[in-house]
Every structure is written in structure tokens, then in C-alpha cells.
């Protein structure tokens, strides 16, 4: 198998400094593109924020005024009272509840007659 001989021109081999410069030149378009893209993105975001704030201001200034309307008249029908409203047993229970409530409000809840007597004794202990 014959092998191809590559260019063996050793006089034209680039030095390390020349290789670094070519690598830097290759990266420059990427950085330029990234910078332009980032700048455009910032401008678009700023415009979007600006327009959204302006829309919020415009909606608060133009509020529709409500139109006055008349309320319809409501006719109230008077119905017969409950059959329990005139029942004698229910009326009697209501009177008993009222009298019990009056007794409870007038009752003495402290009952001072149940307090223990005051004992004032002098107690001395001897050794």
C-alpha cells in the first residue's frame, strides 16, 4: 500500500505565536455576533416593558362610566303568619322563657353568704 506523503515543507511551519493569532482571529466573529445578539435582545426587552407599562396607563385613564338605571319596583306580598304564631302552647312557652330570663338576670351569682369566715388568729410555735 502506497502512502501519500504529506507536505513536508518544514520551513513554512507556523510558530506558536502565529497559531495563537489565527485562533484569536477565528473567535472574533463569534464574539461580535454574540455582542450584537445580546444588544438586540436587551433593546427588544426594554421596548416590550415600555409598551406594556403604557398599555397599563391607558386602560386606567379610560374607564367607562356606568349608565344610571332605574330599579324595578318590588311588590311585596303579605302572606298569612305561621300557624305557630297564634298557637296557645307556643305563646305560653314564650312567656315562661321571658320570666326565666328575668329571674336569671336578677339572680345574685356571687352568693356572698357562702364565703368562709375571716379567721384572724395569732399562731405561735414554741421550740
Image (cartoon, rainbow, N blue to C red):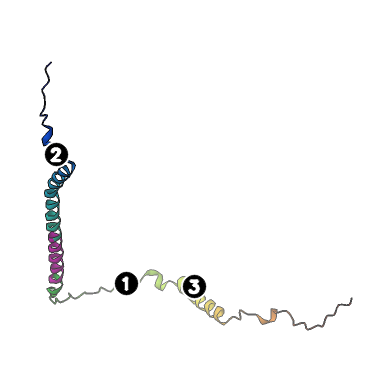
Q: In which quarter of the image is the N terminus?
A: top left
| Above or below 40: residue 73 | below
Residue hosting label 2: 14
Magenta residues span 43-58
Q: What residue occupies the far top of the structure in this picture?
A: 1
Mark 2 secondary-structure assignment:
loop
Q: Residues within 10 Å of mark 1 (few under 14, many from 20)?
A: few
Q: Position of residue 47 (x, y in %)?
A: 12, 63
How many numbered marks are there? 3
Relative placement, left or right, of 6 versus 85 is: left
Q: Report the magenta stretch's main SS.
A: helix
Looking at the image, tell me whether mark 1 or mark 3 is earlier in sequence order.
1
| CA distance separating discs 1 and 3 | 22 Å
Q: Where is residue 118 in the image (x, y as percent from the top left)?
A: 74, 83
Residue hosting label 1: 80
Residue hosting label 3: 93
Amino acid at each position: 500500500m502506497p502512502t501519500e506523503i504529506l507536505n513536508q515543507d518544514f520551513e513554512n511551519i507556523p510558530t506558536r505565536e502565529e497559531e495563537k493569532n489565527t485562533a484569536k482571529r477565528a473567535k472574533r466573529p463569534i464574539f461580535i455576533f454574540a455582542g450584537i445578539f445580546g444588544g438586540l435582545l436587551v433593546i427588544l426587552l426594554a421596548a416590550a416593558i415600555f409598551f406594556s407599562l403604557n398599555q397599563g396607563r391607558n386602560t386606567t385613564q379610560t374607564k367607562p362610566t356606568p349608565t344610571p338605571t332605574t330599579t324595578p319596583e318590588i311588590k311585596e306580598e303579605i302572606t298569612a303568619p305561621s300557624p305557630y304564631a297564634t298557637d296557645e302552647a307556643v305563646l305560653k312557652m314564650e312567656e315562661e322563657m321571658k320570666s326565666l330570663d328575668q329571674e336569671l338576670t336578677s339572680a345574685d351569682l356571687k352568693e356572698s353568704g357562702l364565703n368562709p369566715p375571716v379567721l384572724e388568729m395569732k399562731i405561735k410555735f414554741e421550740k
